[in-house]
Image (tube, rainbow, N blue to C red):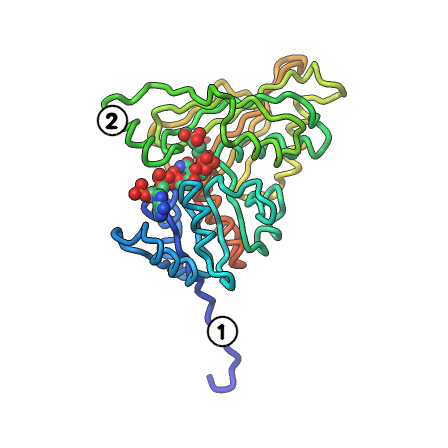
Amino acid sequence: MSGALRSPPPAVHNIFIDGAAGTTGLEIAERLAGRSEFALITLDDTMRKDAKARRDALNAADIAILCLPDDAAREAVDLLDPASKTRIIDASSAHRTTTGWCYGFPELVGPERVANALRVSNPGCYPTGFLALVAPLVRAGLLPADWPYTVNAVSGYSGGGKASIKRFNSARAPAFRAYAYDLAHKHLDEMKIHAGLDHPVIFAPAVVPAYRGMLAEVPLHLGAMAGEVTVEGLRAALREFYDGSAVVTVHDGSPCEELLLEIHAAPSDALELFVFGNKGGWHARLVARLDNLGKGASGAAVQNLNLMCGLPETSGLQLGVAQ
Ligand SMILES: NC(=O)C1=CN([C@@H]2O[C@H](COP(=O)(O)OP(=O)(O)OC[C@H]3O[C@@H](n4cnc5c(N)ncnc54)[C@H](OP(=O)(O)O)[C@@H]3O)[C@@H](O)[C@H]2O)C=CC1
Ligand SMILES: CC(=O)N[C@@H](CCC(=O)OP(=O)(O)O)C(=O)O
């Protein structure tokens, strides 16, 4: 082999998951297990909340993925040395509308922006469904930016992290939990800003006793909107926007009697979009189906991590669509 050109060994990226013992962190680690491109920096259970140990791990990482409550995520960023080269993917809602942070929705902001970013803020699970439906249609001028939109959604109970899992696994688990009746859910700004809307949406979320899964729906009085917008036109625009995506599927207009979330669904990093309308096209329902822990959290973090490391965008993702 003397004189033969050899490729350098592939780079190994040092990754620290801050909050690795939580719901999102554990699913990210599962998706990274066995991937030789990554080496995980870990803290044992006695040190995982120790500020000094976290500071060392955060600064030693090439990329740190924050799977923490918002305050702890802000604290993690503060723990970085001023000269730190560590890049961040934040799964919390602490930085989703913060100047200087890249909104980590590659299909909407462009994969190259995520790939080159120092600070990436992952979208929330509900906003992922809402924005995937509405942002491209507002951009295309098919839906008005000044419309008073409503979002109805159901989530699997893992969407609320360990506390919600404990509640839904207890003897007093509710059969259905509707919430956010203060009309001030923390996702409102994120949805408004990244969809380019003039007004906050009315957001009506609920939780069902399935571990994972999510439906986010935007009902539309299409016939009351100005212009000639049709159900077929909305669907065609979404199909064009996501053409070639391995993650997002826009279903055709085949009849569909029901959309289901399975009680024991397997993890999925796919995002499915549907456009339904009545005869005459006066009413429409835009629906997104996803796994809150997949494209809604951990799958999205791994997709962004791949991009930031120059790896194929969907490496390690589970993209089976349930249909
Ligand atoms: N679950 C989901 O579907 C989604 C979650 N997210 C966001 O991701 C983030 C993580 O959520 P999730 O995994 O569900 O939450 P969990 O409650 O399941 O996990 C959070 C983890 O963070 C740990 N933690 C809390 N404070 C600190 C600290 N100061 N230092 C180190 N670790 C700490 C907790 O420790 P301990 O185990 O001791 O409690 C826990 O292990 C949240 O901001 C959430 O909003 C975003 C999209 C979807
Ligand atoms: C079911 C449930 O409780 N869901 C959480 C949101 C989960 C999520 O998207 O996390 P982020 O808040 O980080 O975006 C809630 O409504 O607060």
* Secondary structure of the residue carrying numbered label 2: loop
Q: Return the mark for residue 27.
A: none
Instruction: Give percent across and percent down for residue 219.
Output: 58, 19
Against 151, residue 113 (above or below) is below
Instruction: Give percent across and percent down for residue 9.
Output: 46, 71
Against 278, residue 294 (above or below) is below
Residue highlighted by disc 2 = 170
Residue highlighted by disc 1 = 8
Q: Residues within 10 Å of mark 2 (few under 14, many from 20)?
A: few
Query: Residue type at mark 1?
Result: Pro
Question: Relative to the observer, which residue lies in front, 26 or 62?
Answer: 62
Left or right: 41, with 62 as reference point: left
Question: Relative to the observer, which residue lies in front, 54 or 300?
Answer: 54
Q: Is residue 250 visible?
A: no
Q: Is residue 99 visible?
A: yes
Instruction: Give percent across and percent down for residue 267.
Output: 39, 39
Q: Residue furthest bottom?
A: 2
Query: Residue type at mark 2?
Result: Ser
* Secondary structure of the residue carrying numbered label 1: loop
